[in-house]
Image: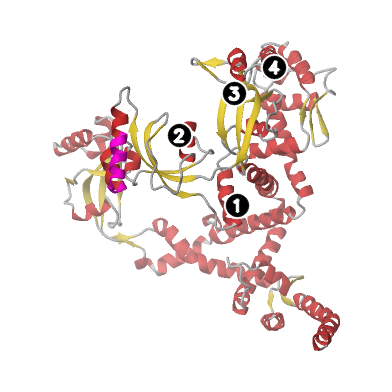
């Protein structure tokens, strides 16, 4: 009864009090903690825009420090707007360029990567055994060759379905290159092991199913899924290796190593005595992780996958590489699903499933939004262009009678031959008509996607507009800071001159060496230069009298870094020893030691400007605060924070 009464009281409390708490929080968020012109800055806005690089809630001290900085930022935005920065053509172009690139990144991270990962993870659970017939066809092969390849594959497909042995069909139809068939049996594969077009097909088949003909970069295939099994975990492998020979020498040597292990000798001792793999010998025979995903020879992977990981080492095994004794240190496992996902995501980055490139996004969007090239109409346009032979494309007339025909469709929008011709005219106008090639339609298609990607991103992700606005604001603030704080062109030079004259003793050069630095790839050339100068030649003449040598003249006050620390110990009119310098060889000639002196105003200018910059910024910010009546309400901030806490 007591518990029931408590629950009733608690529900009544939430019903009566919670709305007032929500209202109180909302009201607190609307507390005005600062003003810039007519713009009010609320407590909620301040918290939202605060960033310390930490996920923790900001302290009152954090917010008090940030408030004037944020109000100054808002004042800079108003100043930039008043001064026309938002309408500046260069600014608009730079902003558009950024937004476009950000749009590509948005699709990668929010759409493509998650979809690719889901598919990759699903496929990573399985391994497939396949057999394929391949007719090699070049990517730009004429249609006649493509048709011939497809005809062969249809016939091969019929014979396989009729029960003709796979090897016979492969021998009859697959292309032979280097004396070997390009088709045939493919050992077990896992995700990311083959080109994506091949993988997309085989992972879509049922065991025993034969595919329709399809294209990859190698040509046209048909593939039979022979078997499917759960993925074999990767294994962390060490080995003792002996190269294969034409006689029994390698066999005898690997068994001598095995006998030594069986007699109780330590692995590292046997390894150092017998292995012929110098690279792995330095790391206790470590090869690394081996699985069906990697580009090891399949018989090598099969041999490792067949070993019992609980055994301290395997019996000798022969592969295409030679003879091995394997020692499996670990079998791939994950402490949590999160760890597994992270590992798979790293693997995904090494496959064609996901590439961080604009072209990859273009191809995704073309599939997603039903892009279609109308090849028949492009053929008509091609015939029309080529008829002009050596005439420059820029002088061609409009393609009368063809202009309204659709050559490309994307996202429900049709693009005509007139559109395409305009692109060809503007991009390749200097070319002759007979240089036209059909692959320019692919370039036009990419341009269409590129021109539409910002609008498409805004439609798909409304929040993207805020990112775009934030970057534009950041861009104008950077540029207005550049003009008013950092730029030498807009500084009051007379003030810098006054600072210089009032502190002239501060701007001095100490005594410093005046030297020649001579560089070459060969010591012999530097020696020749040394002999030339020591025999009375001028250092200024070295680069004209000696080939393949570089000569620079300078002075320095920095004696701490190599090789300039040598200069402090050198005598005037002498050479240093030859030394390494920027991946070549170098030598110093010390011409003189320049006496200490005051800098001229021009020499001291950059130093004075850097020292004056904090004062310059302080004065400019005060001007902004006065102009836009910046108000800081610290007491209201503290009160809002206390209520928030």
Q: How far from the left and from the top, in percent, is residue 78?
A: 71, 63
Q: Earlier in the sequence, mark 1 or mark 2?
A: 2
Instruction: Give the class, few, some or many, for how many residues have Cα within 10 Å of label 4's Cα (few <14, many ≥20).
Output: many
Magenta residue check for 264: yes
Indicate left or right for 525 with 479 as reference.
left
Asked which quadrant contains residue 147, the reply is top right
Circle 1/circle 2 CB separation < 8 Å: no
**What residue did someone put label 2 on?**
300
**What residue did someone put label 4 on?**
150
Q: Earlier in the sequence, mark 4 or mark 2?
A: 4
Asked which quadrant contains residue 248, the reply is top left
Closer to viewer: mark 3 or mark 2? 2
Q: Earlier in the sequence, mark 3 or mark 2?
A: 3
Rounded to the nearest angstrom, the CA distance separating label 3 from label 2 is 25 Å
Residue at point 25% right, 40% down? 273
Q: Secondary structure at mark 4?
A: helix
Front residue of 336/195: it is 336
Q: Quadrant of the N terminus?
A: bottom right
Asked which quadrant contains residue 186, the reply is top right
Identify whether 29 is placed above or below 182: below
Q: Secondary structure at mark 3?
A: loop
Q: Earlier in the sequence, mark 3 or mark 1?
A: 3
**What residue did someone put label 1 on?**
341
Rounded to the nearest angstrom, the CA distance separating label 1 from label 2 is 27 Å
Q: Determine the residue located farthest toward the left in the rendered image.
A: 535
Circle 3/circle 2 CB separation < 8 Å: no
Rounded to the nearest angstrom, the CA distance separating label 3 from label 4 is 14 Å
Residue at point 44% right, 58% down? 606
Q: How far from the left and from the top, in percent, is residue 47?
A: 68, 71
């Amino acid at each position: 009864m007591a518990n029931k009464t408590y629950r009733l009281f608690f529900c009544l409390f939430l019903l009566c009090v919670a709305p007032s708490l929500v209202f109180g929080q909302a009201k607190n968020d609307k507390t005005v903690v600062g003003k810039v012109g007519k713009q009010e800055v609320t407590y909620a806005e301040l918290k939202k825009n605060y960033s310390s690089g930490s996920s923790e809630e900001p302290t009152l001290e954090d917010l008090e420090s940030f408030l004037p900085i944020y109000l100054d930022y808002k004042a800079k935005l108003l100043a930039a707007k008043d001064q026309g920065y938002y309408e500046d053509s260069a600014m608009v172009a730079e902003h558009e360029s950024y937004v476009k690139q950000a749009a590509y990144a948005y699709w990668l991270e929010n759409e493509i990567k998650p979809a690719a990962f889901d598919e990759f993870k699903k496929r990573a659970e399985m391994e497939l055994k396949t057999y394929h017939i391949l007719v090699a066809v070049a990517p730009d092969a004429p249609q006649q060759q493509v048709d011939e390849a497809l005809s062969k594959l249809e016939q091969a497909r019929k014979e396989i379905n009729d029960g003709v042995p796979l090897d016979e069909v492969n021998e009859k139809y697959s292309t032979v290159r280097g004396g070997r068939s390009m088709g045939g049996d493919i050992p077990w594969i896992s995700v990311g092991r083959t080109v994506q077009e091949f993988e997309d097909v085989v992972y879509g088949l049922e065991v025993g199913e034969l595919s329709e003909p399809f294209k990859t970069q190698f040509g046209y295939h048909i593939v039979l899924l022979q078997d499917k099994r759960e993925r074999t975990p990767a294994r962390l492998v060490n080995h003792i290796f002996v190269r294969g020979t034409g006689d029994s020498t390698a066999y005898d040597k690997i068994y001598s190593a095995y006998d030594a292990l069986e007699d109780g000798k330590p692995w590292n001792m046997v390894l150092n005595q017998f292995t012929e793999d110098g690279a792995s010998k330095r790391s206790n025979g470590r090869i690394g992780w081996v699985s069906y995903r990697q580009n090891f020879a399949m018989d090598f992977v099969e041999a490792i996958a067949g070993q019992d990981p609980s055994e301290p080492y395997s019996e000798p095994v022969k592969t295409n590489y030679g003879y091995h004794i394997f020692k499996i240190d670990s079998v791939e496992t994950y402490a949590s699903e999160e760890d597994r996902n992270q590992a798979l995501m790293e693997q995904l980055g090494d496959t064609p499933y996901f590439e961080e490139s604009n072209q990859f996004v273009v191809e995704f969007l073309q599939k997603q939004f039903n892009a279609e090239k109308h090849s028949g109409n492009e053929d008509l346009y091609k015939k029309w262009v080529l008829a002009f032979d050596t005439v420059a494309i820029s002088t061609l007339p409009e393609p009368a009678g063809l202009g309204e025909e659709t050559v490309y469709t994307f996202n429900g929008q049709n693009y005509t031959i007139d559109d395409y011709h305009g692109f060809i005219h503007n991009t390749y106008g200097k070319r002759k008509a007979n240089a036209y090639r059909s692959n320019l339609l692919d370039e036009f298609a990419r341009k269409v996607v590129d021109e539409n990607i910002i609008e498409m991103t805004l439609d798909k992700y409304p929040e993207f507009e805020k990112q775009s606005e934030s970057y534009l604001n950041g861009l104008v603030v950077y540029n207005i800071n550049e003009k008013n704080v950092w730029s030498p062109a807009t500084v009051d030079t007379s003030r810098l001159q006054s600072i210089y004259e009032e502190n002239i003793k501060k701007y001095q050069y100490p005594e410093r060496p005046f030297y020649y630095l001579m560089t070459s790839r060969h010591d012999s050339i530097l020696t020749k230069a040394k002999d030339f100068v020591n025999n009375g030649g001028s250092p200024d003449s070295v680069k004209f009298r000696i080939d393949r040598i570089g000569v620079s003249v300078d002075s320095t006050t920095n004696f701490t870094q190599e090789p300039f620390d040598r200069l402090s110990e050198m005598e005037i009119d002498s050479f240093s020893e030859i030394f390494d310098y920027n991946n070549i060889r170098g030598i110093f000639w010390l011409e003189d030691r320049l006496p200490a002196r005051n800098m001229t105003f021009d020499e001291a200018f950059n130093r004075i400007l850097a020292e004056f910059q904090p004062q310059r910024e302080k004065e400019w910010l005060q001007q902004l605060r006065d102009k836009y009546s910046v108000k800081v309400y610290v007491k209201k901030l503290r009160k809002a924070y206390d209520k928030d806490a």
